[in-house]
Amino acid sequence: MKDSVGYVVVALAGLLTATVGAVAYRSIPPFGVVLAIVMVLAAAIFARTWLSWNGLGVFAGLWVVATAVWSLNGPGNSVLIAQDGLGVAWLLGSVLAIVAAAVVPVKLLVGDDVTA
């Protein structure tokens, strides 16, 4: 049961960070982008710490899907994630944050009692 709840929480974290980041990265340029990327990094590290690689995979997969949806053209050709400097910084910075969470040593995340 604990793992099921964990996967739901991690999935919601992926969707939530993609949605909040897509809206907030333009809020206070350039600090909005930085804060949105830090949010993604924190959530990715949380996902990896709680459910290891599976958690990070679920988080990253749903983050990518939600971000792809927010990047599509909407009615009247409007988009949430524009293809300008801030939009590209948000996308690349967030991907690098997820990669950074993937390369953090397990010992740093869970301490010396590593059983996984």
Image (spheres, rainbow, N blue to C red):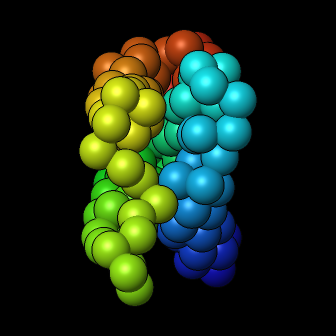
What residue appears at the point 33 percent right and 36 percent down from the top-left corner?
Answer: 84
Q: Nearer the viewer, residue 87 or 63?
A: 87
- The answer to whether residue 36 of the structure is visible from this angle is no
Count of residue discs: 0
Q: Where 74 sits versus 7, above or below?
A: below
Q: Nearer the viewer, residue 7 or 35?
A: 35
Q: Where 63 sits versus 85, above or below?
A: below
Residue 47 in percent (x, y) is at: 54, 47
- The answer to whether residue 73 of the structure is visible from this angle is yes
Residue 79 in percent (x, y) is at: 40, 64
Residue 43 in percent (x, y) is at: 59, 42
What residue appears at the point 37 percent right and 50 percent down from the top-left corner?
Answer: 82
Where's the C terminus, which quadrant? Answer: top left
Where's the N terminus, which quadrant? Answer: bottom right
Drawn side of residue 35 relative to residue 90, left or right: right
Residue 99 in percent (x, y) is at: 31, 29
Q: Nearer the viewer, residue 95 or 75?
A: 75
What residue appears at the point 69 percent right and 39 percent down from the top-left corner?
Answer: 27
Drawn side of residue 14 relative to residue 84, left or right: right
Q: Quadrant of residue 109?
A: top right
Q: Where 95 sits versus 103, above or below?
A: below
In this view, the residue farthest toward the front is: 76
What residue appears at the point 61 percent right and 55 percent down from the top-left corner?
Answer: 23
